[in-house]
Image (spheres, rainbow, N blue to C red):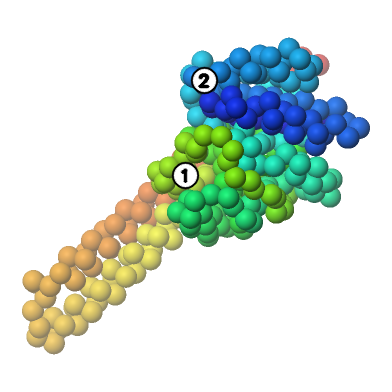
Amino acid sequence: MVSVVVPLLNEEHSLEALNQEIANALESREEPWEVVFVDDGSTDGSMDVLTRLNAENTNVVVVHLRRNFGKAAALQAGFLEARGDVIVTIDADLQDDPAEIPQLLAKLDEGFDLVSGWKTRRNDPLLRRLLSRLFNWATAVVSGVRLHDVNCGLKAYRAEVLQGMRLYGELHRFIPILASYRGFRVAEIPVNHRARPHGRSRYGPERYLRGFFDLLSVTFMGRYRHRPLHLFGGVGLLMGAIGFVTLLYLTMLKIWGHGIGTRPLLTLGVLLVVVGIQLVSLGLISELVTSQHEERMGERERIEQFVEAVLR
């Protein structure tokens, strides 16, 4: 079964056309399918349109959130409601083309666990395209997962990819990165991107700043969660080494008879050494906390296995 999850906010003019396009894209498939609309606290007539679609179509499911919680929370609610073995996400503004869904599903059939869309030709203002390209480049560099477009709302997942994944903040756009860190196979294919027919985007440049902070969180939790000393220790050693070389240089100047008491390099060198030591210490403490957590989790698993054996 294929579940198409559609998060939305004030998209009353797009919903009927979107539902029809999704039906056109999936009706030729032999597998059953459903559309899960998640109303993220709309204040226009979106809920009235969804209520009518739900009454007229047996495969339309509607989830209504009491207020606007954000796209990540809306997607999380949709994932919990979806019954499909494969889940497709698509934005409700009609910029993502539902006709691309069969291509995403075909790519999944090749053995991938997640397929992300790549808007090769975006129908957006120039500033937004530039910011998006910069953000995608930074995401690929920081995360180590080479994707051209993490912001594309058109994606297809196997249901197991989303099991146990908790979304909040701006983490919804980093699902491919989280999945890759968990060992799932991630692919990307070009998809058609259309101009927005109704209204205007509610996302501004500030979302990229919020997204960058979430990117740091995702990268740290994904790549360094079980080895924090590699991050803090590496940065600390680098800063400490630069500080040591700086102080060594000043020491040689002092030996040669030059005054160093008023040189800014002296303060900088001492600061780098102190901060480097602090970062290495923070890494060691983090390693202790991580090891104790793993030991507690292992003990808990052993207790659960013992209880299960006794009950048998």
**Rendered location of residue 290, percent (x, y):** 50, 41
Instruction: Please tell me how many numbered marks the rendered image carries.
Output: 2
Q: Which kind of residue does numbered mark 2 sit on?
A: Asp
Look at the numbered disc 2 and give the secondary structure of its residue: loop
- Residue sticking out furthest to the bottom: 256
Q: Residues within 10 Å of mark 2 (few under 14, many from 20)?
A: few
Q: What residue is at 68 percent from the left and 21 percent from the top?
A: 81
**Left or right placement of residue 56 versus residue 31 in this view:** left
Q: Real-space Cα distance between discs 1 and 2?
A: 27 Å
**Rendered location of residue 275, percent (x, y):** 29, 57
Q: Which residue is mark 2?
A: 44
Q: Quadrant of the N terminus?
A: top right
Q: Quadrant of residue 92?
A: top right
Q: Would residue 236 be visible to someone looking at this image? A: yes
Instruction: In the rendered view, tell whether residue 31 sits above or below residue 229.
Output: above
Q: What residue is at 52 percent from the left and 57 percent from the top?
A: 133
- Residue sticking out furthest to the right: 30
Camera-side residue: 46 or 213?
46
Please tell me the numbered disc located at residue 211. Answer: 1
Instruction: In the rendered view, tell whether residue 307 sits above or below residue 138.
Output: above
**Rendered location of residue 149, percent (x, y):** 60, 52
Q: Which is closer to the viewer, label 1 or label 2?
A: 2
Camera-side residue: 166 or 69?
69
